[in-house]
Amino acid sequence: MGKLAVIGTGYVGLVTGACLADFGLQVICVDNDEKKIKMIQEGKIPIYEPGLDSLVERNTYYKRLEFTSNIKEAVEQSEVIFIAVGTPPADDGSADLKYVLEAAKNIALFMNGYKLIVNKSTVPVGTGQRVKQVIQNVLDARGVNYPFDVVSNPEFLREGSALYDFTHPDRVVLGIDSERAERAMKQVYRVLYLNETPFVVTNLETAEIIKYASNAYLAMKITYINQVANLCEKVGADVHHVAKAMGMDGRISPKFLHPGPGYGGSCFPKDTRAFAHLGRKYQAPLTLVECTTEANEQQKNLMVDKVTSVLGDLTGKELAILGITFKPRTDDMREAPSLVIINRLAELGATLRIYDPEGEKEGKWRLAHLGNRIMFCQDEYSAVNGAEALIIVTEWNQFRNMDLARIYNTMKNKHFFDLRNIYERHIIEKFGFRYYCIGR
Ligand SMILES: NC(=O)c1ccc[n+]([C@@H]2O[C@H](COP(=O)([O-])OP(=O)(O)OC[C@H]3O[C@@H](n4cnc5c(N)ncnc54)[C@H](O)[C@@H]3O)[C@@H](O)[C@H]2O)c1
């Protein structure tokens, strides 16, 4: 098949481009952020995603993968064009489609023949039709009439295991309304098709709903176990046993039943809000999703209450924060629970000694307004040095096996807040710490 273009070279676009190139296809990744493209052309990957650097390097070396900020060139040379630009939340919670519509407009401006436009961004129902309309309007204004199809192909990858997820999806969802487009998409995903990955082929609107319905469901499941954990804590039950037994029920499944400080990241918070907004817009209220977003905000604040209920007045107290990214194995801090927790602890007078293996660069600008209330440390041991308490916010593997005796000896007070339940109480208490976790 001919060349493919991927518009947007972020977490989804770069992974999509590199993985499709690794399937043996010719791919041009395009981004309007010239700095980002220059960086990638120089061999530097702008995000942290395990394995991505070598995948990009290998496919660039074999000339299957190239990068440009010239959208005209990318559109003219390719037949299949993926849109993988951001869809950040607008003020009312809906998804802001300006980048998607801008990409669609640019495609139409430079179309020189049949194009298959594949939307990978997470977008509200109706966007596929809007993209078609935008393209048709531009073609009309240009006075040309090229055939085109629009497909919805939502992405389900998880940051931190994005390459595996892209190449081993549970299913590929395709919202399609033409046979030509279906044939081309099956060709694009031929490698997965041969591996017997299930394909769900449906209409555009259904595919668009599938993505939001899935993400909102997962966010709801996390929130549910968080609330159950909060109750367990009050009544002397152990949420781990509750979750384990629940998960043994085949109808429930054990995944996404780990309590924590609330979900974050670039997807669940904005997708739940956008889905709830969609429900309100079409007068089909998604009240469970509305409650989920509210409960998730409360969960982050409950973590701060947990700390203050033990430490009292935080004025002048130094606290160590271990992990700030929204989850391990990523540098992404979009809507990370750590942001709410750190901001509130600082507001209450604490000084935060922070360590994260990959989050420092992001964290520095996102928390810059806190000035000398925060300090980034070079490792977990320097973070806890002299601290009143340590608070594990993100469960990086290296925090699971810390030298607890060393930590105990360097901390001023021995309060150990494990907001991811990665330790066992009896082990931590054996060292002399006071241990606080969630729901146990
Ligand atoms: N990050 C995830 O884990 C994930 C998973 C599944 C789906 N999604 C969805 O995928 C979409 C992209 O998410 P992301 O995390 O990759 O975003 P991102 O912000 O990391 O990347 C978006 C990229 O698009 C570029 N861009 C914006 N407008 C452009 C234009 N007109 N032309 C060319 N480039 C343009 C930006 O410069 C940026 O590099 C979102 O809709 C998101 O909800 C994300």
Image (cartoon, rainbow, N blue to C red):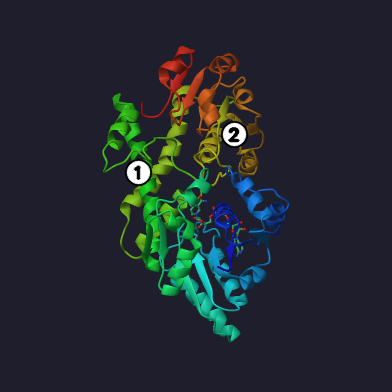
Which of 426/173 is in front? Answer: 173
Residue type at the position of mark 1: Lys
Q: Which of the image's four quarters has the C terminus?
A: top left
Instruction: Decide: is 185 above or below 407.
Output: below
Residue type at the position of mark 2: Asp
Q: What is the x, y in percent for residue 303?
A: 45, 33
User: Ligand 1 lies in which image quarter?
Assistant: bottom right
Q: Is residue 393 left or right of residue 285?
A: right
Which of 369/402 is in front? Answer: 402
Task: Calculate the distance from the C-alpha at mark 1 to the C-alpha at mark 2.
Answer: 27 Å
Q: What is the x, y in percent for residue 168?
A: 45, 49
Q: What is the x, y in percent for residue 104?
A: 55, 70
Q: Is residue 218 left or right of residue 102?
A: left
For the residues bearing labels 1 and 2, Cβ distance under 8 angstroms: no
Q: Quadrant of residue 126?
A: bottom left
Instruction: Decide: is 272 above or below 370.
Output: below
Q: What is the x, y in percent for residue 111?
A: 59, 76
Residue 327's mark?
A: none
Residue 221's mark?
A: 1
Judged from the image, the secondary structure of the residue bearing numbered disc 1 is helix
* Residue 211 appears anywhere in the view: yes
